[in-house]
Image (cartoon, rainbow, N blue to C red):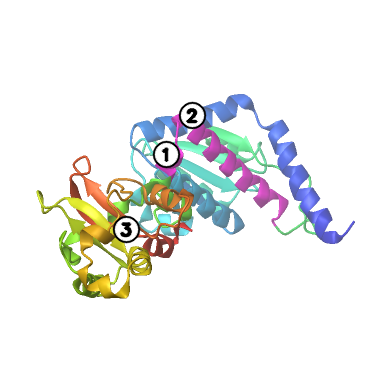
């Protein structure tokens, strides 16, 4: 077995051992404090020093990303004014492998004055820090993955895994959906799939020049070119805000192919247009518009966007714009 695999095995086994040795009662206490904190609109403060501080930052970031208001507090800065970020009824996670980290021990008396619940994630469940906290979770390991058994490796992996597990169970108990998760990740692919709407990507109707039923071929070509969309919509005779049809580049080619050249000058919009084009509503998710375009038997590159039960056109969305948004 390679040294790399051996190190990974040590860390993996350490996490498995932690899962076996963690007290169910203590875990429930921690989860209840987290749920109480979120229900009361309080926040979670996570702190630690050195490698534990880096893990603390990651745990705080994970909590924030799932909708649990959280932040990292540097213990040194806390003693010089940053304690002000901690308020009554907050919950404070303190990370320390030894459980004796002086910088953490120094700020605890000041934190306790604020009616804050203290949760320890410690490598020594019998340490001073563990005894001071309201509840502590045992993140102890038999040995580090480091060949010298010195560098924080397995211990930091266990502490981070405990943070991830707490976040996952909290999400489950709060009933966090993928839509809730997306609200905090608007730039990610998941966020875009669940938040980006057709109206966010469409070209609004005010930027498009319409065709009339009797517009001739020369003007049709000119308007399609000016629109820069590869299409133009034909407005209804009865309602100028309604769509009577759609003419795309493909419609033009088909009309020219099926007509004699001498008859081209006689062609009107109502002879070329698609009378009942596929349409979509502005509040529809853009990912659904993409599926609609891709799942049709023939290729669809544009969709008229309509509202008021299809009686009013408000824009046109292009396949190109959906792809450019990063949805595909």
Q: Earlier in the sequence, mark 1 or mark 3?
A: 1
- Pick the front one: 165 or 207: 207
> Where does residue 90 sit, x and y in percent of width and height?
39, 39
Q: Earlier in the sequence, mark 1 or mark 2?
A: 1
The Cα atoms of the two marked residues, 3 and 2, are separated by 39 Å
Q: Could you tell me if residue 67 is visible in this image?
A: no
* Picture residue at 42% right of the left edge, 48% below the top: 292
Total marks drawn? 3
Q: Is residue 289 above or below residue 19?
A: below
Q: Nearer the viewer, mark 1 or mark 2?
A: 2
- Pick the front one: 273 or 139: 273
Q: Is residue 28 above or below residue 263?
A: above
Q: Main secondary structure of the magenta part?
A: helix
* Picture residue at 74% right of the left edge, 49% below the top: 11
* Picture residue at 45% right of the left edge, 52% below the top: 72
Q: Is residue 123 above or below residue 260?
A: above
Label annotation for residue 317:
3
- Pick the front one: 71 or 142: 71
Label annotation for residue 173:
2
Task: Check if residue 210 falls in the magenta segment.
Answer: no
- The residues colored magenta run 152-181
Q: Secondary structure at mark 3?
A: strand
Determine contact: label 1, label 3, CB under 8 Å.
no
Q: Label 1: few (<14), some or many (≥20) within 10 Å?
A: some
**The N terminus appears in which quarter of the rendering?**
bottom right
């Amino acid at each position: 077995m390679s040294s790399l695999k051996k190190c990974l095995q040590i860390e993996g086994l350490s996490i498995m051992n932690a899962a076996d040795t963690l007290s169910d009662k203590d875990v429930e206490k921690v989860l209840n404090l987290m749920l109480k904190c979120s229900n009361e609109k309080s926040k979670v403060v996570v702190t630690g020093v050195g490698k534990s501080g880096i893990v603390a930052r990651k745990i705080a970031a994970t909590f924030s990303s799932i909708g649990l208001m959280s932040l990292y507090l540097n213990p040194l800065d806390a003693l010089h004014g940053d304690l002000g970020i901690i308020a009554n009824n907050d919950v404070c996670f303190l990370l320390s492998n030894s459980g004796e980290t002086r910088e953490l021990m120094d700020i605890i008396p000041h934190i306790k004055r604020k009616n804050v619940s203290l949760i320890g994630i410690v490598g020594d469940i019998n340490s001073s820090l563990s005894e001071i906290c309201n509840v502590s979770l045992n993140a102890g390991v038999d040995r580090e993955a480091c060949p010298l058994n010195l560098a924080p490796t397995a211990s930091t992996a266990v502490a981070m895994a405990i943070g991830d597990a707490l976040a996952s169970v909290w999400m489950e108990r709060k009933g966090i959906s993928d839509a809730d998760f997306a609200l905090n990740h608007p730039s990610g692919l998941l966020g875009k799939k669940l938040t980006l709407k057709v109206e966010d990507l469409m070209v609004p109707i005010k930027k498009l020049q319409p065709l009339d039923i009797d517009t001739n071929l020369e003007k049709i070509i000119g308007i399609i070119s000016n629109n820069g969309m590869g299409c133009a919509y034909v407005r209804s005779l009865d309602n100028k805000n309604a769509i009577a049809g759609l003419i795309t580049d493909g419609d033009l080619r088909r009309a020219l192919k099926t007509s004699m050249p001498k008859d081209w000058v006689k062609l009107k919009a109502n002879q070329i247009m698609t009378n009942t084009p596929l349409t979509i509503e502005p509040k529809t998710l853009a990912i659904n518009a993409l599926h609609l375009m891709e799942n049709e038997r023939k290729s669809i590159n544009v969709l008229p966007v309509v509202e008021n039960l299809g009686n009013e056109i408000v824009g046109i969305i292009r396949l190109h714009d959906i792809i450019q948004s990063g949805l595909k």
